[in-house]
Amino acid sequence: MKKRQFISTAAASIASALGASALPALAVNSAIQDAKPTGPAILTIAGAIDRSNRGPTDPVIDQMMHKQNVKFNRAFTFDLAALGKLPQVTINPTMEYDGKPHQLRGPRLAEVLDTLGASKAAGTQIVFHSVDGYMPQIGFDQLRKQGYILATQIDGMPLAIGGFGPIFAIYDADRVPEMAQKPLGQRFALCPWGLYCVEVIAGK
């Protein structure tokens, strides 16, 4: 059997056995396993997760986390290249800043959290930490339902620090009926730009 045919047959067999919905998770898991950050971390995921690739916060080195009272014993970090290797999604929400649709691109946050073994307990909360100290909190179930992504690009350009970067946690509010009916200024209160840390707090 030719190699390409074998790979296609194997993929079809996996899809049949696990269901098509399992394929994105498999892709994310594979990308995370293969990704070995070599650049500076731009995103840290901490809290109730099973997988990690770094140790506890350092009150000297991790100055922003220290000043914003972000503490953990272990976490998983991504550099920009590692995030770029994850399966990417494109959304086109109408932005509150100019009332125009913009193309944002990045991996689905729920899939990343699932792959890291984030708690699935009822009531699990996700806390975002931004460079300006903004710290919104959202239920994991709501985040998953609304399809949040970790946007690293806008309109084909990388997100910059000083703009929306390094990461913008956002969803396509235009396509979430209960949010689309709200005024633009009320759709994105739980969507922080300048995101650098995501904390998972397990439900009780």
Image (cartoon, rainbow, N blue to C red):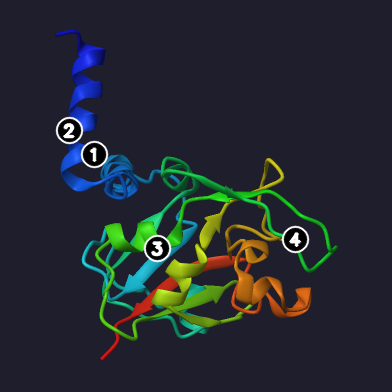
> Which comes sooner in the sequence, label 2 or label 3?
2
> Which comes sooner in the sequence, label 1 or label 3?
1
Three-letter code, disc 3: Ala
**The quadrant where residue 179 appears:** bottom right
Image coords of residue 37 (percent x, y): 37, 46
CA separation in Å, label 1 and label 2: 5 Å
Three-letter code, disc 1: Ala
**Mark carried by residue 94:** 4
Residue with the mark numbered 2: 13
Instruction: Return the residue found at the far right.
Output: 98
**Mark carried by residue 145:** none
* Helix, strand or loop for disc 3: helix
Q: Are marks 1 and 2 in contact (CB under 8 Å)?
A: yes
CA separation in Å, label 1 and label 3: 20 Å
CA separation in Å, label 2 and label 3: 25 Å
Q: Tell me: 56 left or right of 17.
A: right
> Which comes sooner in the sequence, label 3 or label 4?
4
Q: In the image, what residue occupies the spot 34% across and 82% down?
A: 124
Q: Do the residues labelled 4 and 1 touch (CB within 8 Å)?
A: no
Residue with the mark numbered 1: 15
CA separation in Å, label 4 and label 2: 40 Å
Q: In the image, what residue occupies the spot 78% across and 78% down?
A: 183
Residue with the mark numbered 3: 110
The residue closer to the viewer here, 127 or 26, is 26
Q: Judge depth for marks 1 and 3 and give the one in front.
A: 1
Image coords of residue 21 (percent x, y): 31, 50
- The quadrant in which the C terminus is found is bottom left
Image coords of residue 64 (percent x, y): 52, 74
* Helix, strand or loop for disc 4: loop
Image coords of residue 122 (percent x, y): 29, 84
